[in-house]
Amino acid sequence: MAIETTKDSVCINQIIEQKNESIVAEADSIIPDIKPDILSAISTSGTVCIYKKEIMDGKVRIDGSINAYIMYLADDENGSIRSINSNIDFTQVIDMPKAKQDMMLETNVVLKNMECKVLNGRKVNTKAVMEIEVKISANENVDIIAGVKLNDVQTLNTSVNVHSLIGSGTTKVYAKDTFVLDNIDNLAEIMKVDVKINNKDTKISYNKVLAKSDMDVKILYLTEDNRINVVQNVIPVMGFIDIPDIAETHMCDVKYEIKNLIVKPNSVEEHSIYVEAELEIFCEAYENQEINLIQDLYSPSVNLNFTQRSIKVMQTRQTMQNTCSIRENQQIMELQGNKIYDVEIKTEILKQTLLNGRVLYEGELKLNFIYAGSNQSGIDTKLITIPFNFNVDFDGINTNSNIETLIEIGMQDFIVTSDNSVEIKVDIVFNTTLVKNADINIIDDIKEDENRAINQYSMVVYFVKPGDTLWQIAKKFGSTSEEIVRVNGIDDPDRLSISQQLFIPRYNG
């Protein structure tokens, strides 16, 4: 016969499977007929766009494209600098045995490196290396027994803090703007485009999450009189995500993904460039909830049977943001006071060490300077590497912690001084997230066994064995912890001595 119980409902977001993979995408591109032959590549860069993600049974499929720009030295009598824009399409299928179609999929793709190989004067091969993190999760509404409606039931309880999922949602937004050039600049072609999403912020109100950020766009372009110039602007990004029952006290985990990017000369207005980006914003909202778990139970008067199962829950998800400020003066004689058109910035974490309350990072900052050179083409590049060490103090982290680190580039400034040195100012923003998961046991399906054997004793003498607890002893003899403490005059129920003599009274409640 089933026993009546009271239950609390908790929505658990369980990470089912997580995987990191390296993706290589490459494509051949033909130099357009209106442009001169290529002699050598100067700079290759791109922006990753993920336009489709699909989760299937046992696998995940990701379709995307890299919006690539190749600056090159032309094989002409002037040795001019030109550029081509191409899309490198890719499809990646990742085996994930636990994946199911009704689960949730998160991806994070980082472009690590791009290379361009000249095949002949009219054809190049572009290869891109990306690192992708794939996370599959599932939402489960779990009913947890909070109480048993039986007069003499004895329960062993514990309290657990969990991040209970309030809800999740996605919205699509468009960031558009027209970048105005100098009036003297007649645009010949776009040479290079860099896009970054910075200054992310959220605000919760009226069952919605307002996600705000800045899309920082930097465009290197060529004028018709063969000058290279730069225009940079910030496009505000804002989107509303509907999540019912969300409150200001809840926590949000927001991620941005570029789905498509358009950068082209403005056909309506001269001396301007039109920029449009399609972005997807995904949000999960959590609340910190303390739940009471019954770990074990019995009744001195009724024989109870029950089942137990284990589930994985998120106990903590806490993010700290810290800034590593690189401030250096470096002698780069190649620049010789020339104008810097652009600096390509890449960071790499070479080693990560976890200590109690601290994370130690060792990495490299790679700076590729694109500057006005003294050679025939009038442009050149110089790559320098700056090693760095950075420590993040984070209460709760230990050597076995599970952490996630996301790196962004904040403020950047490069000034060529009169003594041919470069004053370098770069802020590396570390977003360190501590994730604590735990396996908890949940009691299900409590029933009464009608074939209970009746104990005839009124008192038992018992000698404590190694590993015994008062709870185990009381359950074994159908007594209660309170009765054993009362009869034996025990001062501290949590401290029993091996071979200690206990009188176990029969329960008469």
Image (spheres, rainbow, N blue to C red):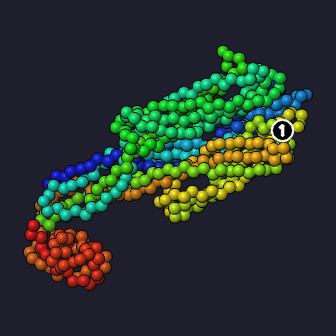
The image shows residue 353, relative to residue 237, as above or below, that is below
Q: Secondary structure at mark 1?
A: loop
Rendered location of residue 474, percent (x, y): 20, 72
Does any portion of residue 410 appear in the rendered image? yes
Quick one: quadrant of the N terminus? bottom left
Residue at image location 37% in from the left, 33% down from the top: 206
Q: Tell which of 145 and 346 is nearer to you.
A: 346
Q: Tell which of 443 and 322 is nearer to you.
A: 322
Rendered location of residue 332, percent (x, y): 82, 47
The image shows residue 18, relative to residue 51, as above or below, that is below
In which quadrant of the rendered view does residue 310 lie? bottom left
Residue at image location 37% in from the left, 40% down from the top: 247
Residue at image location 82% in from the left, 31% down from the top: 81
Residue at image location 41% in from the left, 42% down from the top: 285
User: Which residue, as the protein is rendered here, is positioned at the far top?
Assistant: 268
Residue linked to disc 1 = 338
The image shows residue 379, relative to residue 469, as above or below, that is above
Which residue type does callout 1 highlight? Answer: Asn
Rendered location of residue 336, percent (x, y): 86, 42
**Image mark count:** 1
User: Which residue, as the protein is rendered here, is positioned at the far front?
Assistant: 418
Q: Tell which of 361 and 138 is nearer to you.
A: 361
Left or right: 160 with respect to 29? left
Quick one: quadrant of the C terminus? bottom left
Left or right: 96 with respect to 115? left
In which quadrant of the rendered view does residue 273 lie? top right
In which quadrant of the rendered view does residue 64 lie? top right
Please tell me how crowded label 1 is: few (under 14), some (14-19), or many (20+) other residues with Cα within 10 Å: some
Rendered location of residue 9, percent (x, y): 29, 47
Left or right: 339 with respect to 499? right
Does any portion of residue 100 appear in the rendered image? no
